[in-house]
Amino acid sequence: MFKKNTAGVDTARVKERLEEHKTKMKLSLKACAHCTLCAESCFLYMARDKDPKYTPSYKFINSIGLLYKTKGNVDKVTLGEIRDNVWERCALCTRCYCPLGIDIPEMIALARSICREQGVYPQYDRE
């Protein structure tokens, strides 16, 4: 089996953070029906020609969902992809509306804090 190079990532701490929020995270991921009803509540989605990468559900699933799926065994590259979802594509304005009651902003904030703890920050110098 292929093993990721997790050098530079404190995977034990990532796993600890995931464990702290496991119940709500697991329930939220299971409850997401991929209905995209949350999409139009996101001004970035609307402003970016309805690019699916800006839907709140996409950002949630491709950040916390990815961390959960890998059980915290992530490398800096994966954290960089998560960074793009939680900082580049999300203003954390808390306007996301999920008809199933998923607190998407809370889950994205958790992904941001995990990235921050691992030294992965938004790249403001990108063009």
Image (cartoon, helix red, strand yellow):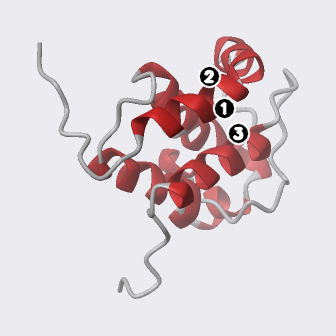
Provide residue 95's location: percent of width, then percent of height: 85, 53
Provide residue 127's location: percent of width, then percent of height: 35, 86
* Structural distance between the alpha carbons of marks 1 and 2: 6 Å
Q: Which mark is residue 14?
A: none
Under mark 2, the amino acid is His
* Structural distance between the alpha carbons of marks 1 and 3: 17 Å
Are there few (<14), some (14-19), or many (20+) residues within 10 Å of tag 1?
some
Are there few (<14), some (14-19), or many (20+) residues within 10 Å of tag 3?
many
Are there few (<14), some (14-19), or many (20+) residues within 10 Å of tag 2?
few
Q: Which mark is residue 36?
A: 1
First in sequence, mark 1 or 3: give its number.
1
Provide residue 30's location: percent of width, then percent of height: 66, 11
Residue at left offset 68%, top offset 45%: 110
Under mark 1, the amino acid is Thr
Residue beneath disc 3: 107
Under mark 3, the amino acid is Met
Q: Secondary structure at mark 3?
A: helix
